[in-house]
Amino acid sequence: MINETQIKELTNQYLVDFPSLFLVDVKVGIGNRIKVRVDSDESVLVHDCRALSKFIESNLDREKEDFELEVSSAGIDFPLTNIRQYIKNIGRSVQVLTVDGSTYKGKLLAATESEIEVANEKKEKGKKVVVENTTVDFNKIKETKIVISFM
């Protein structure tokens, strides 16, 4: 059976030659449905995904075990999971949900290996918005998503 560790190792082996690209997520589901998500410090091109897909396929044996492979970029709707993604998105609006159910929404100000800082927008009485810089430990983050604004 194909496992996530095997796919992560193959992906990281390939990405050594492409330092701006990095692995975000690997899932191997029922029937060997493999999903690989990558991101980049700049941008992920279709060519990057296609080349990585070919590399992974060339290192797996369909005669031995059939599989379905999907390689894609971690799109704007995909939660941030990697410190490099946080650093890349400093200055953008985010919504952070913590494991205790708290929500912080505002501009991502900083990111380190252990925490992030968000200019948290809180509405007070009278519909006044107050911005308070809030630090959140990485181990307390359940999910962080980019907030898309069309203004």
Image (tube, rainbow, N blue to C red):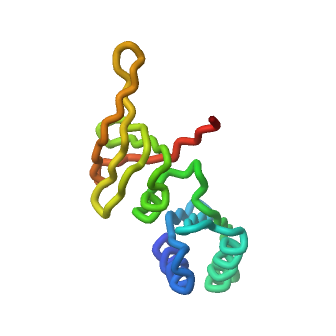
Expressed as whole percent of the image width and height from the top left, the position of residue 6 reads 50, 77
Expressed as whole percent of the image width and height from the top left, the position of residue 104 reads 37, 38
115, 141: nearer the viewer: 115
User: Which residue is at 48% across, 61% downward?
Assistant: 88
Quick check: 5 above or below 60?
A: above
Tally of numbered discs: 0
64, 3: nearer the viewer: 3
Q: Residue furthest top?
A: 126
Using the rendered image of the protein, determine whether residue 54 is visible from the camera's viewpoint. yes
Quick check: 112 above or below 53?
A: above
Expressed as whole percent of the image width and height from the top left, the position of residue 65 reads 64, 77
Quick check: 74 above or below 41?
A: above
Q: Quadrant of residue 64?
A: bottom right
User: Which residue is at 36% across, 45% downward?
Assistant: 118
Using the rendered image of the protein, determine whether residue 1 is visible from the camera's viewpoint. no
User: Which residue is at 29% across, 38% downward?
Assistant: 100
Relative to 114, 123 lies left or right = right
Q: Quadrant of residue 11?
A: bottom right
31, 54: nearer the viewer: 54
Expressed as whole percent of the image width and height from the top left, the position of residue 30 reads 58, 60
Q: Quadrant of the N terminus?
A: bottom right
Q: Quadrant of the C terminus?
A: top right
